[in-house]
Image (spheres, helix red, strand yellow):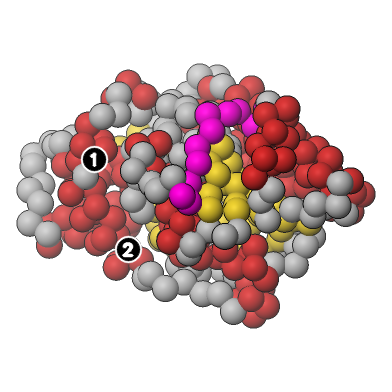
Amino acid sequence: MKKIIVTGGSGFIGSNLVNFLIKKNYFVINIDKLTYSSNNLVHKNKSKKRYKFFKVDIINKRKLIYIIKKYKPVAIFNLAAETHVDRSIDKPYDFISSNILGVFNILESLRFFKKLNQNIKLVHVSTDEVYGDITKNNRSDENFCYKPSSPYSASKASADHLIKSYIRTYKINAVISNCCNNYGPYQYPEKLIPKMISNIFNNKKLPIYSKGKNSREWIHVLDHCRALLMLYLKGKSGQSYNVGSGMNLRNIDLVRKLIKICKIKKISIKDKTKIIFVKDRPGHDFRYALNIKKIKRQLGWKIKIKLNEGLFSTIEWYLNNQKFLKRISKKNYDKRLGLNL
């Protein structure tokens, strides 16, 4: 049975990826430091025959090397990252530490094992935000210039550049996924979709930045997991691959769609559950949009879950798993962030 390390395997995308890989009959080693948004409970009942967890920060290179040496994985999927843009505005150091220095330690570990003739493939999860604002009717391909706007996107852009430098200089085996906004089960409710769902369930206002005209591309997390496995199996070392749906939606239209689906599902929409507009975050990009022709043409990948279908199933999941929301401390996601200038 092939072994794969997933760093950040207790986060939103990471926990879904761990489950996905186990179902594909891989032995998964999850390395996660368990921050405020971790979902480690999702793995507690996993078969010990195909799953192992280590509470480790990727800043700790010595422990990384120990785990890699012990399990001899064929690949490392790096999803260990601080992700929320608003938090990066308030505390940028955390993002520099995890998203740049942490990646550096993974790369140094891979360089160490390459000297021992162990060629481990790195699949690094980046973001569409590295491209910055994309003008209307345009979509960023893999050759677009990087123009990050926040400490978060800048830290992810830095990691991408660092990885590419190690590929060229040290010949490590690595590919990069630049993905659009994910949604689905186990997403922490500081992000737009689960926050709106949670507020609808709890008769709270639905706050949207500015006038809600900012445009985002959305993909179900399981489609992203399928793409990541494809990058491991077929992705060419040294290449970046945009992973998206090709489907853009304004934030205001997305929230209206969530309300409509909740009404269809007979979820009560009470008096306080109304859309309100709040002060925009500093440096907020207006539009992200990916050109995904490369991954479709070269690897034969495309999405399977359409947006309406995915939103229906996501709302259903949160409806059936409200204990997931209740066990999270509200102080970690109710307070407005990103205004600490």
Say if the magenta span includes residue 54: yes
Tell me if 246 is positioned left or right of 97 in this view: left
Q: Position of residue 8 (x, y in %)?
A: 54, 40
Which residue is situated farthest in the right direction here? Answer: 169
Q: Is residue 284 above or below residue 305?
A: above
Range of magenta residues: 49-59
Q: Which residue is mark 2?
A: 310
For the N terminus, the quadrant is: bottom right
Q: Which residue is mark 1?
A: 198
Say if the magenta span includes residue 179: no
Q: Position of residue 192 (x, y in %)?
A: 37, 44
Mark sitting on residue 47: none
Label 2: how many residues lie within 10 Å, few (<14), some (14-19) or many (20+)? some
Question: Which comes sooner in the sequence, label 2 or label 1?
Answer: 1
Tell me if 42 is positioned left or right of 272 in this view: right
Q: Residue at x 50, y 37 (%)?
A: 53
- Residue 150 visible? The answer is no
Q: Residue at x 72, y 40 (%)?
A: 69
Q: Residue at x 12, y 62 (%)?
A: 264
Type of the residue with mark 2:
Gly
Q: Secondary structure at mark 2?
A: helix
In the figure, residue 230 lies in which quadrant?
bottom right
Viewer-proximal residue among 188 and 152? 188
Viewer-proximal residue among 109 and 177? 109
Tell me if 322 is positioned left or right of 211 in this view: left
Q: Position of residue 199 (x, y in %)?
A: 22, 38
Label 1: how many residues lie within 10 Å, few (<14), some (14-19) or many (20+)? many
